[in-house]
Amino acid sequence: MSTGVKDLSKWGVVIGTVLVVALSILKAFWGLFSSASFGLSMTEIVMVGGFCVVAWSPVYVSLWIDKFTGKKEAPCGAEPT
């Protein structure tokens, strides 16, 4: 896995999504494995996944805003336009 900012942002979104899906499936089938109730509500599961996405999304939001406004990355050492 690369350590570039775009890649880290992408993996934050992927991990958040996988976490929500996995915990939702686990909650749905929890009654088959245990008589105790599952410790997380769906609201908490979605909030945990949402936190992963929000924690890593500023990079993507910045890229979207730059594309919308037409800004381009400046070469190293040059002034941005």
Image: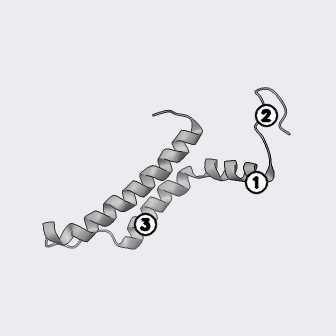
Question: Which quadrant of the structure image shows residue 81?
Answer: top right
**What type is the residue that disc 2 sits on?**
Ala
The residues bearing labels 1 and 2 have C-alpha atoms spaced at a distance of 16 Å
- The answer to whether residue 46 is left or right of residue 58 is left
Q: Which residue is mark 2?
A: 74
Question: Which quadrant of the structure image shows residue 79?
Answer: top right
Q: Which residue is mark 3?
A: 46
Picture residue at 26% right of the left edge, 63% below the top: 26
Q: Nearer the viewer, mark 3 or mark 1?
A: 1
Q: State the residue in front, 26 or 37.
A: 26
Tell me, for residue 68, which label it has, or none: 1
Circle 1 SS class: helix
Question: Which quadrant of the structure image shows residue 45?
Answer: bottom left
Label 1 neighbour load within 10 Å: few <14, some 14-19, many 20+: few
- The answer to whether residue 46 is left or right of residue 80 is left
Q: How many marks?
A: 3
Does residue 42 lie above or below 81 as drawn?
Answer: below
* Relative image position of residue 72 (x, y in whole percent): 78, 40
- Earlier sequence position, callout 3 versus callout 1: 3
Picture residue at 48% right of the left edge, 61% below the top: 50
**What type is the residue that disc 3 sits on?**
Val
- The answer to whether residue 9 is left or right of residue 24 is right
Tell me, for residue 53, which label it has, or none: none
Label 3 neighbour load within 10 Å: few <14, some 14-19, many 20+: some
Q: State the residue in front, 70 or 6.
A: 70
In the picture, the quarter occupied by the N terminus is top left
Picture residue at 77% right of the left edge, 29% below the top: 75
- Earlier sequence position, callout 2 versus callout 3: 3
